[in-house]
Image (cartoon, rainbow, N blue to C red):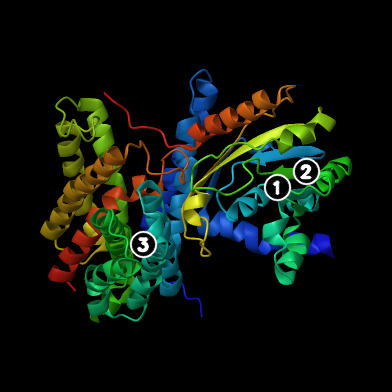
Amino acid sequence: MKNLLRILFVMLLARPVVRLWLGVTVRHQERLPDSGPAIVIANHNSHLDILALYSLFPLGLIPRVRPAAAADYFLKNRWMAWFATNVVGIIPVVRGGMRRDPLADCREALHNGDILVLFPEGTRGEPEALSDIKSGIWYLLRDFPDIPVVPVYLHGLGRAMGRGQWLPVPFFVDIAIGRSLQHLDSKEAFCALIRDTLLQLKQKTLPAAPPQD
Amino acid sequence: MFKLLLPPPLLWALGGVFLLLVLASITIRLLETRKPEKNWLELKLRIKTWWWIVGCFSLTILGNIPIALVVFALISFLALKEYLTLCATRTADHVVLFWAYLSIPLQYYWLGIHWYGMFIIFIPVYIFLFLPMRMVLIGETQGFLKAAASLQWGLMISVFCLSHMAAVLTLPQLTGIGVPEQGAMMLFYLVTLTQLNDVAQYLWGKSFGKRKIAPKVSPNKTLEGFVGGVLTTGFLGWLLGPLLTPFSPLHATLAGLLIGTMGFIGDIVISAVKRDIGVKDSGRLLPGHGGILDRLDSLTYTAPLFFHYVHYLYF
């Protein structure tokens, strides 16, 4: 039932919004993982980000794709919590929680062979600007050093529907997918690697300059 | 009821275009096997995309006006989206952009109900006055003029100007003169001549081009390409005129020359915009061509001008 709801959500909402209303160009779709366990990391500017990422996967794989999202935001009220966990299928992450390991559910998902979607900036931030990379991903990967980490840069979604906005305005969206990253022993080096990779991918999404003669 | 209204001349003309595409596809296959060392991918993509373009365009001349209007509205939607994606919009104007998009279904609705008076002033007057009002209500003054002007210009080009293709199609219904088939034939005449003009200017320029005509805007455009292209299009206008239009031979030749000159102007105006923004192509929607505005650039000029030419002389 839950799987069906999620597939319908992607088929009837995510794909039409992203592919028809917005319109999207994808570079290197083949680099996306086609089975779990795997981690997909992306920059985060809009609630549309997760719709865009969902629209990249085949429908049959959707039940396996699980985005980690902030519990304090998405579990605010009962209706939103039901929608977020059952229809969108998020894994709630408690931000700044001291009580227990905030990433426990993410670990479990990876153990189950799911494709975990993480936004390592932690928050949507300013439209089309990359915030600092949070170190949670590094801690998570310490236990799963062999899992592929596929970086994805999403360009244009913050403009289409940024923070505080609820209407998606049509803009063409460009998505660039990079080669999977290797875990590094140094936390700082790994966060820097993620940031550099995302910035490099950003360059690929920008349009080509006119010829100079 | 779905009624096919394809008059024989249109059938022949459309058949000719499909024949051209088949020939192009066969040629590229042959070239690929003869000279596999050269890279034919770009040209192959181009021809494949042409099939799509011709397929979509064919939908508009089959005689079903509502289908045609939906196709043209989608074209305007894609063109405006491409323009707004390129141009710098303000975060504050989020809702305003929504209103701008809403003008597209309305603009084509006026044609659907044959209300010419509203069609011709809706965007230049009502939308022109409405959008700044909506922006003022939001209250952000930083960059106001630039944001308002860019948005208006985009709407004029991608909605108002391009909607004149649909206006040519519905011209007999708008004016109550002539028969509906004439609209479809004149639309075919306009679009085919505009596209052939692009090709002719390119070929003449490639073969004989020496003197640059607009070096800062479009370094590849030459005087020889322009003159050769315009004369070719004038000739084609004269040739196709009796088949597809009610024009006298003189008027058909002049229509061809008008489309040739103005197609060139539309091309370099959009080139100037792209150069100002700093991009090579307006988008990536049409593989091998670039964006949809790269393909429709000439039509932004030829469609409204041809419409008024025909409206004044015959309808």
Pointer 2 with pointer 1, Cβ within 8 A: yes
**Where is mark 1, residue-wise?**
A57
Q: Is residue A164 visible?
A: yes
Q: Position of residue B217 (x, y in %)?
A: 22, 35
Residue B99: which numbered mark, if any? Answer: none
User: Which residue is painted at 25% across and 68% down in the image?
Assistant: B128
- The quadrant in which residue B103 appears is bottom left
2 or 1: tag closer to the N-terminus = 1
Chain ID of residue with mark 1: A
In front: B242, or A128?
Answer: A128
**Where is mark 3, residue-wise?**
B10
Chain ID of residue with mark 3: B
Circle 1 — which element? loop
Mark 1: which amino acid? Phe
Pointer 2 with pointer 3, Cβ within 8 A: no
User: Which residue is painted at 82% across and 63% down in the image?
Assistant: A2
Q: Position of residue B224 (x, y in %)?
A: 16, 32
Cα gap from disc 2 to disc 3, whole angstroms: 54 Å
Mark 2: which amino acid? Ile
Residue A115: which numbered mark, if any? Answer: 2
Q: Label 3 neighbourhood size at 10 Å, few (<14), some (14-19), many (20+)?
A: many
Q: Is residue B61 visible?
A: no
Seen from this angle, which residue lies furthest front?
A98
